[in-house]
Amino acid sequence: MTRTLSRWMALRPVALALAGVLALSAGGARAGLFDDEEARKAILDLRARIQASDDGASAKIAEQGKAQAALMEQVQQLRRSLLDLNTQLEAQRAESATMRGTQEQLARDVAEMQRTLKDVSKGQDDRLRALEPQKVSLDGKDFLAEPEERRAHDQAMAALRGGDFDKAATALTTFVQRYPASGYVDSARFWLGNALYGQKNYKEAIAVFRTLVSGAPLHPRTPEALLAVANCQIEMKDMRGARRTIDELTKTYPASEAAVAGKERLGTLKG
């Protein structure tokens, strides 16, 4: 409606001119002012002007259409650009989420690797520690013992505590021969003598106890070793030898519990 009104307003001068021409033509017919040729020329001229006006309006409409189409194209292009931008943003968000997931997984993997390395390191330390000399406190003495050395001693003592004198005597004899400089050796000799006593191998027991007495006179087990020698002699019916041994015990270690026990045993001896 607006476009039609605008076109009408543009053609209004032409219409008025045409009406004037027609009026003049009519008046001329009556008055004889114009002939037919002039009227025809006027009409043709009016038609040309109307056609020119129509062509101008059509050109404007076409130009407006082109401008509107160009604007629509720009709008569509803008929409496509916004859609592409949104797609890129979504892709970046997805990529960022993937990267965060990857980083979190890497962090978990690193933590797991650190725990594994820590466990491996601890295991290696434990294995190395198991191979290192270990501190031992025995009979008032501190010393270092190799793991295998300590294991051999403990196994021999376990056999002795279990009452297996044969196994204990063999194990302790092997230990003393294999580890002559061991911190266990004096204690091992004392218990070897007891294992031999348990076997009723009194002669060998006396020899082992005497080795301890002469080799380690200050060892806390030495007074007990002398008392054990006396007991072996008593079992062998060597009462005189037992008396001499107890006398040696009471003179050398008078304050020891073994000396007290030796005196009591001496009172029961006959012969």
Image (tube, rainbow, N blue to C red):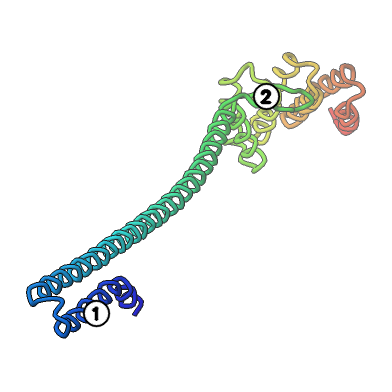
Relative horizontal placement of residue 268, taking residue 216 as reference (left or right): right
Around disc 1, counting alpha carbons within 10 Å, would you say few (fewer than 14), some (14 to 19), or many (20 or more)?
few
Of residues 217 and 142, which is closer to you in this image? Answer: 142
Q: Amino acid at mark 1?
A: Ala
The quarter in which the C terminus is drawn is: top right
Picture quadrant where residue 14 is located: bottom left
Q: Tell me: residue 102, above or below residue 138.
A: below
Percent coordinates x, y for residue 247 in the rendering? 87, 20
Residue under pointer 1: 19
Percent coordinates x, y for residue 206 in the rendering? 70, 23
Of residues 121 and 32, which is closer to you in this image? Answer: 32
Q: Tell me: residue 103, above or below residue 205.
A: below
Contact flag, marks 2 and 1 (Cβ < 8 Å): no
Inter-mark Cα distance, 2 to 1: 146 Å
Picture quadrant where residue 166 is located: top right
Q: At numbered mark 1, what does the secondary structure look like: helix, strand or loop?
A: helix
Q: Residue at x 74, y 23 (%)?
A: 142
Q: Residue at x 81, y 22 (%)?
A: 240
Nearer the camera: disc 2 or disc 1: 1
Of residues 157 and 224, which is closer to you in this image? Answer: 157
Specify which label sits upstream in the sequence, 2 or 1: 1
Q: Amino acid at mark 2?
A: Tyr
Residue under pointer 2: 184
Q: Residue at x 29, y 59 (%)?
A: 70
The quarter in which the N terminus is drawn is: bottom left
> Which residue lies most toward the bottom here?
30
Q: Tell me: residue 171, above or below residue 63.
A: above
The circle on residue 188 is none
Around disc 2, counting alpha carbons within 10 Å, would you say few (fewer than 14), some (14 to 19), or many (20 or more)?
many
Percent coordinates x, y for residue 252 in the rendering? 87, 17
Relative horizontal placement of residue 164, taking residue 27 as reference (left or right): right
> Which residue lies most toward the front here?
31
